[in-house]
Structure formats: structure tokens, C-alpha cells
Image: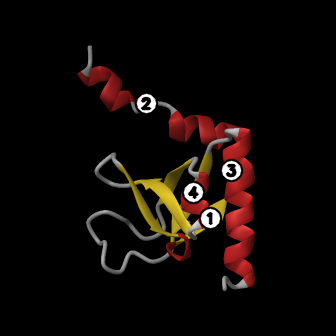
Amino acid sequence: MMNFERFIITIYVMKRVKMNIASFAVCIDNSGYPVSLELHKIYRVLPDERAAADDTLRVIDESGEDYLFSAGRFIVVDLSVAVKRAILQPSRKVLQKSR
């Protein structure tokens, strides 16, 4: 049985998935995944109802690929619209390289 905190995270993520809203989470535990996850970094969480039901989050990691990680490794955060735009915008370095 899930504890109350995990239950709240699951409900929160599932609601955002159904509404197709960009979600973000801060890594609070990278043990076992030091190359894939950076402590205290904000990660994009992709919509995945099945993952949320299994107490996991589908996160885009340092490689740029999405993987499932235990929800307990993250704290889901609600960011302002301006911060979400800044995070989701391609970096200027990437845009300059593609020209």
C-alpha cells in the first residue's frame, strides 16, 4: 500500500497527464543513477498514466531519453508559466549549432 505522500503525487501527476499539462520534478535521490540523474535538478516529467499508477515517473534524464524512475526520487513541483516556457524552449546553444 502506498503512503499518503506517494498517493498525493500519483493523483497530482495523473490529473496533469489527463489535462496534458507539462509537469516537472526536482530530483532528491540519485543513488544508483549518478550519471542519469543530478541531485536538485529540475526534470521534465512526461505524461504516463500507467507509470503514475505504478508509483513511477517517466522522466527525461541527462541523456535526453525518457526513463521510468521511482516517484520517491523526485518532488513534483508547480512552476510559473514563465519558468515552464524557459525550460521547454530549446537552448540558444542548440539553436546556434543547428544554423
Give the mark nearest the N terminus, 2 or 1: 1
Give the mark nearest the N terminus, 1 or 3: 1
Identify the residue position indicated by label 1 in the image: 53
Gap between marks 2 and 3, in whole Å? 18 Å
Q: Choose between 74 and 81: the one closer to the eye.
A: 74
Q: Choose between 29 and 70: the one closer to the eye.
A: 70
Gap between marks 4 and 1, in whole Å? 5 Å
Q: Residue at x 44, y 67 (%)?
A: 69
Identify the residue position indicated by label 3 in the image: 79
The image shows residue 26, relative to residue 21, as above or below, that is below
The image shows residue 99, relative to residue 26, as above or below, that is above
Q: Residue at x 34, y 23 (%)?
A: 95
Q: Residue at x 69, y 55 (%)?
A: 14
Q: Are marks 2 and 1 in contact (CB under 8 Å)?
A: no
- Return the mark for residue 14: none
Give the mark nearest the N terminus, 2 or 3: 3
Gap between marks 1 and 3, in whole Å? 23 Å
Residue type at numbered disc 2: Pro
Residue type at numbered disc 1: Ala
Kindly report which numbered mark, 3 or 4, lies closer to the viewer in this rendering. Answer: 4
Identify the residue position indicated by label 2 in the image: 90
- Tally the numbered discs: 4
Residue type at numbered disc 4: Arg
Determine if residue 80 is in view: no
Of the 4 image quadrants, the one containing the N terminus is bottom right
Identify the residue position indicated by label 4 in the image: 50
